[in-house]
């Protein structure tokens, strides 16, 4: 039974990895070495999540996040972690991002660190972790 569950997780992970990668490539260039807009992590650690590192902050815009959320429509137990990985800010900004579920978004962006144009981003069905930043 354990092997069957792992096999299903691996199948689901692969399907979602392809789906998330395709969705993200419609918005930008993928590159794992910070020479693009984002990177969809290609390591399956056995969890029910996909992880994206965002280098281009424009990919935090609500329409991009809403598109990612639609990718989970038939995977209600999965989530997409979106982490900010802005080049040059590694030592200045704390870890922050979004956790996207089919039914909502946990908003962990610390807006006081973001450029002014990104401080007022709001997402449907979201709950902000840092309300006073």
Image (cartoon, rainbow, N blue to C red):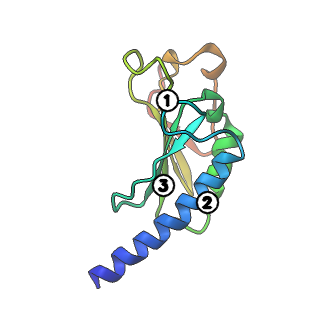
**Which residue position holds label 1?**
109
| Label 2 residue SS | helix
Q: Which mark is residue 74?
A: none
Residue at x-position 66% and y-position 18%: 117
**Mark closest to the chain's N terminus, 2 or 3:** 2
**Mark closest to the chain's N terminus, 3 or 1:** 3
| Label 3 residue SS | strand
**Mark closest to the chain's N terminus, 1 or 2:** 2
- Position of residue 65 measured from the top left corner of the image (x, y, whole percent): 63, 43
Please name whichever residue, 109 or 42, is drawn nearer the observer in this view of the structure: 42
Q: Is there a contact, CB below 8 Å, between mark 3 and mark 1?
A: no
**Real-space CA distance between mark 2 and mark 3, rounded to the nearest whole angstrom:** 13 Å
Residue at x-position 35% and y-position 78%: 5
Q: Which mark is residue 19?
A: 2
- Farthest residue, direction bottom: 1
Q: How many marks?
A: 3
**Real-space CA distance between mark 1 and mark 2, rounded to the nearest whole angstrom:** 24 Å
Residue at x-position 54% and y-position 18%: 114
**Which residue position holds label 3?**
79
Please, is residue 83 above or below residue 104 in the view? above
Please name whichever residue, 100 or 40, is drawn nearer the observer in this view of the structure: 40
- Position of residue 132 measured from the top left corner of the image (x, y, whole percent): 47, 20
Please, is residue 35 above or below residue 48 in the view? above
- Position of residue 124 measured from the top left corner of the image (x, y, whole percent): 65, 43
Residue 94, quarter of picture: top left
User: Mark 2: few, some, or many residues within 10 Å (few <14, many ≥20)?
Assistant: some
Please name whichever residue, 120 or 41, is drawn nearer the observer in this view of the structure: 41
Quarter that holds the N terminus: bottom left
Please, is residue 43 above or below residue 63 in the view? below
Horizontal relation, residue 16 to residue 118: left or right: left
């Amino acid at each position: 039974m354990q092997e069957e569950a792992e096999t299903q997780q691996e199948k689901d992970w692969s399907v979602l990895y392809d789906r998330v990668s395709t969705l993200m490539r419609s918005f930008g260039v993928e590159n794992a070495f910070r020479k693009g807009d984002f990177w969809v992590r290609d390591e399956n650690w056995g969890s029910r999540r996909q992880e994206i590192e965002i280098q281009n902050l424009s990919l935090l815009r609500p329409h991009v996040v809403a598109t990612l959320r639609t990718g989970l429509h038939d995977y209600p137990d999965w989530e997409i972690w979106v982490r900010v990985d802005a080049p040059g800010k590694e030592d200045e900004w704390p870890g922050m991002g979004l956790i996207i579920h089919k039914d909502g978004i946990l908003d962990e962006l610390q807006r006081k660190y973001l450029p002014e144009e990104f401080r007022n981003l709001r997402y449907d069905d979201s709950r902000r972790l840092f309300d006073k930043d």
